[in-house]
Image (cartoon, rainbow, N blue to C red):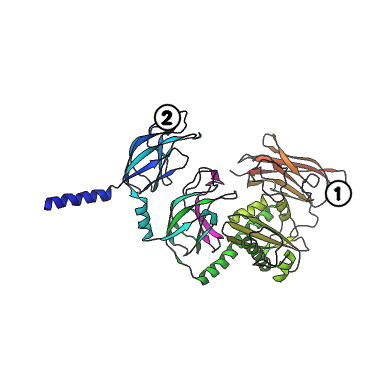
Amino acid sequence: MKFIFTIIFYLLISVFIYSESICKVLPINKKQSSGVYVRQGDEVTISVSGKWSLWDKYSLADGKGHDYKANDLGNWGALLGKIGAGKVFYIGNGITISSQNEGVLYLFPNKDKYLIENQSGELSVTITGGTPIEDFKNELTSSMRKFVFNPKDGLLSTNILVNSGDFIQIYAMGYWNMWDGVYPEVSAEGHDFLANGEPWGKLYGSIGSSYGESLEYFPIGEKTSYTAANSGILSLYPFISNYVAVKNGELEIYISGGSEALEEQIASIDKEVQKYSEQMILNKLNAFRAACGLNAFTIDDRLSNSAIGHAKYMVKNNVFTREQDINNPFFTGVTLEERLKAVGYEGRVREMFCMSDLTADAVELFINSIYHRTRLMDPLMSTFGYGCYKSGDSTIHTFNYGYSEESGDVSSDWTFIAYPEDGAVNINYSWNGIENPDPFPSGTVKPLGAPATILFKEQISKVEKAMIADADNVLIDCFVISPQTDINEKKINAVSLVPKIPLKANSTFLVNVEVKLGSTDEVQSFSWSFTTKK
């Protein structure tokens, strides 16, 4: 009897350690979850049976794929695997691996750059090792907070207070999509293509205000461990940058670390974050002003209070407008003048606002544009206020600029202001070309090269020449926007040259503009150079 008991005990232990799972894998674009979670160091054996075809012109094939090498990973239609954010590996009809990383085991066909069309069949995959995902989720639930995140919401505010130095862990499981019906579902690692350097739709974290204004942000993907540099509320969002998204799907999020935030803590943090963001933007704007040889801005709290109110009004009412409706909630004044009067400000103010996930991007949108850039080059601007509000999938940044009657540090006899300035380095080589109103003819292909702009004090009567050339004196094809050519008739007294395609990175370019100013027939020439960033 003792011998029998020992055998049964060992059998139970064996089953516990070496779990076995069976799943079906279809010949589709989606990376399909095996239902197994693999930890680093786990030994996993994968056995494959069945047949499939990625195109009905090819006969059914096993896990080794069709008789056609697609890439270094093997044949077209070969079964591939990926564990979490790790490297893709070949499986074929079977493999045993010791995992170098941690995450969900995904299975999918090797389609390379080719289309899957009129596919058929399926593979049956037996996996020995790892942990069934549902069991792993139960482990996480026992020790971590659980959230469900639909990307249509845009932002998930966890109400978790994270203090500077706190260590947090985040797991994300499930599928979502940043363009439903166009791109296949993906995990929290995001789509295969990049949006400004990051996978489009990758899960990101933000520490800052309760409404998503960020002191710091960091990539998460399916799993991350992170130590906070600042204190704030933890929020999550899909990284979409400035791209349009039609989102769908759902992630299950598990978080450890931090504590539940109290209402008074949230109010205090929101105020601190507003001041931090305001100062960060001020620094960026003043760096731009300094490059133009202009006086620095100073913060006026009244302008900020008006900006915050208008940003909140637009987000809460799902509008993007200069005027408010008195019948709508969060109303602060029909016109800008009324909103300024309500906060005790009198004087001339210019208001700008934009949509952007990231605060730093909001400043760059204006500096890289045409109409807004030239407004920011006005020597008479002297004060600044900023407000941001985020709710759901909408984030609006509002900027208010006050004018003085004096030109500050700029001499009253100034002739021109150019940006990028002569000899500037680390200048953007690309611009998305998005501005309202659109400065470019209908059908213009974007992105474009970043603009070069020269603003004149004396009225431009005629533009004789406007060109950008590279270091080899090869001319760059540009749009030239001036008071005489501006399709929107903004009558801004500047010449802006916008390359029709992005410029080459880490390269020097020469700008030459020749104009007639005022009533004279004299042609004046202005030349300067700049170098794009790496």
Residue 230 visible (yes or no): no
Marks 1 and 2, how far apart at CA: 73 Å
Locate residue 110 relative to residue 3 in the image: left or right.
right
Residue 379 visible (yes or no): yes
Q: Residue 211 lies in magenta, yes or no?
A: yes
Structural crowding at the residue carrying mark 1, measured as other residues with C-alpha within 10 Å and reported as few (<14), some (14–19) or many (≥20):
few
When asked about the image quadrant of residue 123, the answer is top left
When asked about the image quadrant of residue 63, the answer is top left
The residue at the point 73 percent across, 64 percent down is 335
Which image quarter holds the C terminus? top right
Locate residue 351 relative to residue 212 in the image: left or right.
right
Residue 302 drawn at (x, y percent): 68, 68
Q: In this view, does 33 lie above or below 349?
A: above
Which one is in front, 16 or 383? 16
Residue 514 drawn at (x, y percent): 79, 42
Q: Name the residue under label 1.
A: 518
Q: What stretch is highlighted in magenta?
A: 192-218
Q: Which of the numbered marks, if any, corresponds to residue 123?
A: none
Q: Mark 2 points at which residue?
A: 66
Which one is in front, 209 or 287? 209
